[in-house]
């Protein structure tokens, strides 16, 4: 079936249990599906945009209230919606970093963090990971000290991931923020893999900025995300325009420079809003999600030769697994090579493992119900047994 022309309909979530590492937290709620259809037209949210003409002041649909609610939920002073976590990094980097300023991020930072700092001309330094693939306050302190000595001034900004995309490990954000603040360095917490799936309290972490991804973790359409900030940093990143036309003398009121006035229009913002009640409720079920994650990881670990590269027991639903000593041995002689794994799983109704990979790969169990978790765990074990691997 086609949507139009050569565009096929997409039936992934209808037909399969999807364990794709980046898609799990961004599946829409039924409420968001309805909202997306209703607000599909271009500038649909602008029907009732009244003075002072800014997205976050619109009351119908209740976009203004949504901004207040998300700020309260994250325990941060102010929030704006943005087109993806990356646009949040970009706004903060553009505000805080001048060309040649030293900046810190981590050995597990996402490319979008790097690129946002590159745009601002920051001089990039990574905080190394420790032997357990964690970013620690100890390593952050060493790098803060080194870089401050080298430049004769402290870094302009520090990015740290609450949960990284490579291992799904949880890092020492609170402790890192504490040392960074001893150097007066503002801290941005990247919550792309946490905001919307697990509880996040910005003030408890003591960070200055929190960034979340709507399409990664808030059951929202792409592109969407949130940028939250506190105190003076909120004033800076959400500063309003001062520009004036030299011929017309026009000025532009309270449009915010980094937000380009208005950010998320139509389906993305209304979709994120429609999912929000369910998202608020689901973060409270985090312990159950983690238990489910461990059930699947334990099933994989019961296959001889399999190891887990993420911290274990798991504290998150995104996991990096090493099957060089198990599935990859099968791939060496299988007529379908590495494709046997994704192919066999697909036959059992499980999708989301990169086709062909049998070495080191990632999956995410977020949002699956108990029956689906059971099915995924059993499928991994069955594929192992069908191919002569021993299971304990
Ligand atoms: C996915 C991801 C991003 C990018 O998020 P977008 O909302 O797509 O911009 C940034 N950081 C991490 C750690 C991610 O996993």
Image (cartoon, rainbow, N blue to C red):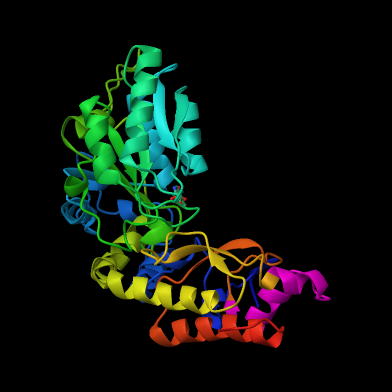
Q: Which x, y percent locates residue 185?
A: 27, 27
Q: Quadrant of residue 168?
A: bottom left
* Residue 376 included in the magenta stretch of the image: no
Q: Quadrant of residue 177?
A: top left
The N terminus lies in quadrant: bottom right
Q: Which x, y percent locates residue 118?
A: 50, 28
- Up the image or down, 73 lies above or below 15; here it is above
Residue 261 visible in image: no
Q: Which x, y percent locates residue 189?
A: 32, 43
Span shown in magenta: 328-350
Number of marks: 0
Q: Residue at x 19, y 38 (%)?
A: 230
Q: Residue at x 45, y 72 (%)?
A: 365
Residue 350 visible in image: yes
The C terminus lies in quadrant: bottom right
Q: Main secondary structure of the magenta part?
A: helix
Q: Residue at x 39, y 85 (%)?
A: 370
* Residue 333 included in the magenta stretch of the image: yes
| 318 with respect to 188 (left or right) | right
| 347 with respect to 108 (left or right) | right
Q: Which x, y percent locates residue 181?
A: 22, 30
- Up the image or down, 161 lies above or below 346; here it is above
């Amino acid at each position: 079936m086609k949507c139009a022309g050569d565009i096929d309909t997409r039936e992934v979530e209808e037909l399969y249990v999807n364990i794709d590492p980046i898609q799990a937290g961004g599946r829409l709620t039924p409420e968001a599906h309805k909202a997306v259809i209703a607000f599909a037209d271009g500038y649909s949210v602008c029907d009732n945009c009244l003075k002072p003409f800014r997205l976050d002041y619109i009351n119908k649909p209740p976009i203004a209230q949504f901004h207040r609610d998300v700020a309260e939920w994250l325990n941060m002073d102010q929030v704006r919606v943005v087109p993806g976590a990356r646009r949040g990094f970009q706004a903060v980097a553009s505000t805080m970093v001048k060309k040649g300023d030293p900046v810190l991020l981590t050995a597990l930072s996402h490319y979008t963090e790097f690129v946002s700092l590159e745009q601002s001309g920051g001089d990039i330094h990574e905080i190394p990971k420790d032997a357990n693939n964690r970013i620690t306050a100890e390593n952050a302190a060493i790098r803060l000290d080194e870089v401050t000595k080298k430049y004769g001034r402290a870094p302009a900004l520090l990015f740290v991931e609450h949960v990284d995309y490579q291992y799904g490990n949880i890092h020492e954000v609170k402790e890192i923020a504490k040392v960074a603040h001893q150097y007066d360095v503002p801290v941005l917490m990247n919550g792309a893999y946490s905001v919307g799936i697990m509880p996040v309290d910005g003030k408890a972490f003591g960070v200055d900025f929190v960034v979340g991804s709507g399409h990664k973790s808030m059951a929202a359409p792409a592109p969407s995300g949130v940028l939250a900030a506190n105190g003076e940093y909120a004033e800076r990143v959400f500063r309003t325009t001062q520009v004036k036309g030299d011929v017309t003398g026009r000025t532009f009121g309270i449009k915010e420079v980094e937000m380009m006035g208005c950010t998320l229009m139509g389906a993305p913002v209304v979709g994120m809003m429609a999912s929000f009640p369910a998202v608020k409720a689901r973060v409270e079920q985090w312990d159950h999600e983690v238990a489910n994650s461990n059930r699947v990881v334990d099933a994989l670990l019961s296959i001889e030769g399999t190891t887990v590269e993420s911290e274990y027991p798991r504290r998150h639903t995104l996991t990096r697994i090493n099957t060089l000593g198990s599935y990859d041995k099968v791939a060496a002689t299988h007529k379908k090579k590495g494709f046997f794994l994704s192919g066999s799983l697909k036959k059992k109704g499980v999708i989301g493992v990169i086709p062909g990979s049998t070495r080191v790969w990632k999956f995410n169990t977020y949002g699956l119900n108990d029956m689906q978790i059971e099915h995924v765990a059993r499928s991994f074990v069955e594929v192992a047994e069908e191919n002569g691997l021993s299971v304990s």
